[in-house]
Image (cartoon, rainbow, N blue to C red):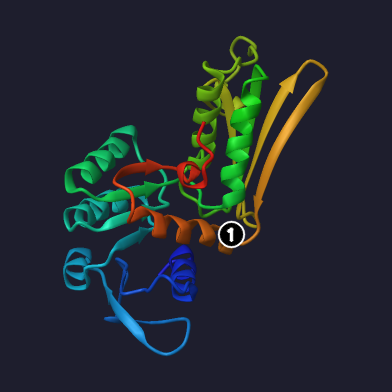
């Protein structure tokens, strides 16, 4: 019933190889959801378990919040339903639980912090550049209603950069007594600065610095439709995979 949910529903309905069979939302007030493309409707419920038991879908697409997503993923995995999730804010223990749920139930889960193909390429390029710089910072800018900060994409980028580099980045020294919070949250030696303002959707800059030069990689999300090719790609791919797949890089051939 949210903005991303409605966008995903439209994309699934427009894609010839996928078919929407039902929808779940805690705020569901009716029992049927009208389809955005042409006549017809599908079941709508706030009871995910009964919905999955009745419909037996191949894939559940999740865009919610971490505290709601984990119980939903538990239910879907036990129903042998494959899962595509774009929810962020999971703890390391919750990611490990997703891995265990997929393996135990013989299902596939694809979880990524960002479905925009350009954002995935941005992260990949940042990992390549990370090998050649000692200093880097990330600025991520999102709309004022985004709850988590830093964004999952920023944290994933920092982790991928440090992995490619083989060690954390150097962090410039701070003056004694300076509140470290003014330098942003630190991940892998990278300061991550979060902006939350009306007017933004989702944007990220990775800035590398070296003697006499800077190098910036930036991705801008202009419309939520940019996520949909990645969502559809993952939805088709997840039924052929088992276990937990983190990120779209393995599907796009951008690993390593």
Foreground pick, 122 / 155: 122
Give how far across and how far down residue 255 sits, in percent.
50, 35
Name the residue located 58 percent from the left edge and 38 percent from the top edge: 123
Residue 51 appears left or right of 127: left
Left or right of 69? Residue 195 is: right
- Residue 222: image location, x then y, percent: 65, 58
Q: Is residue 166 above or below residue 197?
A: above
- State whether residue 196 appears in this view: no
Q: Relative to 54, is 165 above or below?
A: above
Instruction: Report crowding for label 1: few under 14, some 14 to 19, many 20 or more residues within 10 A (C-alpha).
Output: some
Which corner quadrant of the image does residue 102 belong to? Answer: top left
Q: What x and y, as percent, mark residue 248?
A: 48, 46
Looking at this view, is 161 or 70 the one in front? Answer: 161
Q: Residue at x 62, y 21 (%)?
A: 131
Taking the spot 59% from the left edge, 26% from the top edge, the residue there is 191
Residue pointed to by mark 1:
226
Which of the 4 image quadrants contains residue 1?
bottom left
Instruction: Tell me the element at label 1.
Output: helix
């Amino acid at each position: 019933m949210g903005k991303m949910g409605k966008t995903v529903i439209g994309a699934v309905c427009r894609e010839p190889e996928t078919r929407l069979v039902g929808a779940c939302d805690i705020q569901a007030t009716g029992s049927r959801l009208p389809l955005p493309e042409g006549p017809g409707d599908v079941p709508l419920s706030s009871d995910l378990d009964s919905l999955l038991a009745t419909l037996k879908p191949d894939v559940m697409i999740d865009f919610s919040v971490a505290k709601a997503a984990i119980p939903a993923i538990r239910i879907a995995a036990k129903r042998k339903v494959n899962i595509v999730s774009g929810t962020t804010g999971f703890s390391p223990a919750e990611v490990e639980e997703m891995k265990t749920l997929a393996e135990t139930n013989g299902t596939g889960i694809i979880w990524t912090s960002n479905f925009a193909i350009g954002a995935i390429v941005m992260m990949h390029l940042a990992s390549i550049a990370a090998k050649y710089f000692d200093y880097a910072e990330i600025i991520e800018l999102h709309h004022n209603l985004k709850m988590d900060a830093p964004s999952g994409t920023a944290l994933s980028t920092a982790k991928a950069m440090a992995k490619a580099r083989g060690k954390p980045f150097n962090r410039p020294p701070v003056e004694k007594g300076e509140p470290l919070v003014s330098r942003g949250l630190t991940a892998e030696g990278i300061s991550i600065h979060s902006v939350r303002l009306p007017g933004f959707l989702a944007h990220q800059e990775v800035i590398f610095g070296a003697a006499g030069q800077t190098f910036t990689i930036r991705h801008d999300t202009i419309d939520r439709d940019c996520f949909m090719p990645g969502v559809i790609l993952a939805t088709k791919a997840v039924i052929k995979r088992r276990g937990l797949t983190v990120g779209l890089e393995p599907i796009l051939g951008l690993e390593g």
